[in-house]
Image (cartoon, rainbow, N blue to C red):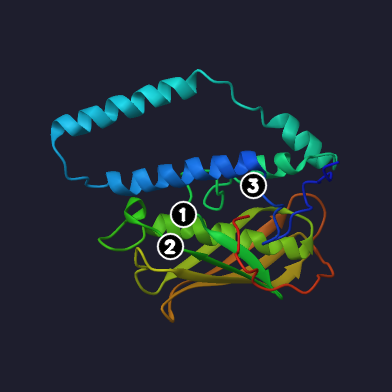
Amino acid sequence: MDSQYGFFDTPVGEPPPPTPESLARRDIAAALRQINERLVRLDTDEASLRDYAARFRALADELTALPRRPQEPIFRRLLARQGSRQDVLDIMDHEIMTGQATALSPPLELWRDGDVVRGRATLGAPWQGPPGRVHGGVIALMMDILLAKTQDMVEGVGMTGTLNLRYQAGTPLKQQIDMEGRITRLDGRKLMAEGRFIVDGQTTVTAEGIWICANGSYARKALPDAGQPAEATGV
């Protein structure tokens, strides 16, 4: 019998193994990301572009006719600790920036290393702001996600209160961005965290943020030893 999962049973870097269904969804997302990357300034004739548009539109219409799996029952099962492995993957694999089954994701990989949340991502042309550089708003989104994951190290969960970034250098496209985030202090309902992005040994962005616990106060919890898995996976 498949194990039962709760909403908070999947710490940083430790998602359940993918099901065959989830592997198929991830394959679709990987293909869509590749298409999206190639469509940026695609250099071909108008007739070819119209042909691609018609083919993609036909597929979009076909998918639109299919039902969507409802989200609310999944969350209810997970909050009651009665979720399945597929329930967990249906949520995690479609999370913004980290989900492996969404084309709206590089994907950003995260894992816990002691008291540090580490991450990595490589972003291509669709994420461009200044020429050859990642858009600053995308950087802010990734930093928010990175620092929010430090909450896996404490009791309690909440939402971003403030997030202050310092852009020290342009973050290049098509180069691996290494990330690290850590808790600096807990103060009742407030969790303070700091993070930075590094590319080829250079810090490009630093940040400080405050998270506000949704119910009660934050508290430290005992954590097992952890390090970078052989293949870090999105959370």
Q: Front-most of 7 and 130?
A: 7
Question: What residue is shown at x 28% (from left), y 29% (from top)?
Answer: 53
Q: Give left or right: position of 118 versus 63.
A: right
- Which residue is situated farthest in the bottom direction here? 201
Q: Give left or right: position of 175 versus 82.
A: left
Q: Give left or right: position of 26 versus 124.
A: right
Quadrant assignment for the C terminus: bottom right
Q: For the residue marked with disc 2, what is the amino acid?
A: Thr
Q: Do the residues labelled 3 and 2 touch (CB within 8 Å)?
A: no
Q: Do the residues labelled 3 and 1 touch (CB within 8 Å)?
A: no
Q: Check disc 2: other Cα within 10 Å, few if <14, some if 14-19, many if 20+.
A: some
Q: Are marks 1 and 2 in contact (CB under 8 Å)?
A: yes
**Residue 208, which numbered label?**
none
**Residue 92, which numbered label?**
3
Q: Mark 1 points at which residue?
A: 106
User: Secondary structure under badge 3?
Assistant: helix
* Disc with the residue nearer the chain's start (3 vs 2): 3
Q: Front-most of 214 and 90?
A: 90
- Which residue is situated farthest in the top direction here? 65
Q: For the residue marked with disc 3, what is the amino acid?
A: Met
Q: For the residue marked with disc 1, what is the amino acid?
A: Pro
